[in-house]
Amino acid sequence: DAGVIQSPRHEVTEMGQEVTLRCKPISGHNSLFWYRQTMMRGLELLIYFNNNVPIDDSGMPEDRFSAKMPNASFSTLKIQPSEPRDSAVYFCASSFGSLISGQGYTFGSGTRLTVV
Amino acid sequence: GENVEQHPSTLSVQEGDSAVIKCTYSDSASNYFPWYKQELGKGPQLIIDIRSNVGEKKDQRIAVTLNKTAKHFSLHITETQPEDSAVYFCAALHGSSNTGKLIFGQGTTLQVKP
């Protein structure tokens, strides 16, 4: 398996532009998580899905952020409009079934977003 | 709300020495505690975990201990090597094992000096 695939690896955009981050989870995994990593706040959970349904989006900073999971093999995180404070590394992770009896989260390599 | 505190934020040790990273959690219902290692430019990777029904688990040079009463758990790395240098994150499960979420600590940057 190729693991969790995120694209793009790096994104530089101007303030006010729309940014779309993409994630392909491991085939067969039924939970998907979007995290944001910054020096100041560490790893923050933004939103997660179980069987393609959003379970908890309380970590989404504001209405500028939205996430979708149209099917089991694809998810997007969109920021519109982007702001410099959105600059961070965004990670997608997936898991299967019970965390306690399973293999934990598998993280992608992340998308480094820079908003100038 | 749920919270995980991790200490220290940075740790520097000589090769061969031991390293200890400590975490506390707030959700008394948490029953699963994984540790992740993040190398430069990569996503975090699971290295060891512990369930609440055991107090200690060991895997070669790494071990985790759990004190549920104190809501405290620790990662111990013995005989450290330069390749152990990375950022380490502890986490605690909040919610059910099937639909819950991991809450991560702030991370510890471990530097092992040759």
Image: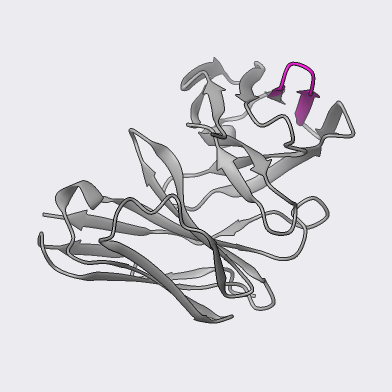
Q: Which residues are magenta?
A: B62-73
Which of the 4 image quarters holds residue A3?
A: bottom right
Tell me, yes or no, if residue B54 can be seen here: yes
B59 to A3, vertically: above or below:
above
Q: Is residue A111 left or right of residue A27?
A: left
Q: x%, y% of residue B114?
A: 52, 23
A32 to B77, vertically: above or below:
below
Residue visible at 68% across and 58% down in the picture = B99
- Given residues B114 and A13, the one toward you in this image is A13
Q: x%, y% of residue A75?
A: 46, 74
- Given residues B73 and A5, the one toward you in this image is B73
A33 to A87, vertically: above or below:
below
Q: Is residue A51 left or right of residue A110?
A: right
What's the image's color scheme? one colour
- Given residues A45 and B14, the one toward you in this image is A45
Q: Residue furthest right?
A: B53
Residue visible at 56% across and 16% down in the picture = B14
Q: How many marks?
A: 0
Tell me, yes or no, if residue B16 can be seen here: no
Q: x%, y% of residue B12?
A: 49, 18
| B2 in the magenta segment | no
Residue visible at 66% across and 52% down in the picture = B100
Magenta stretch: helix, strand or loop mostly: strand
| B67 in the magenta segment | yes
Q: Is residue B53 left or right of residue A66?
A: right
Query: Which quarter of the figure is the N terminus of chain B placed in?
Result: top right
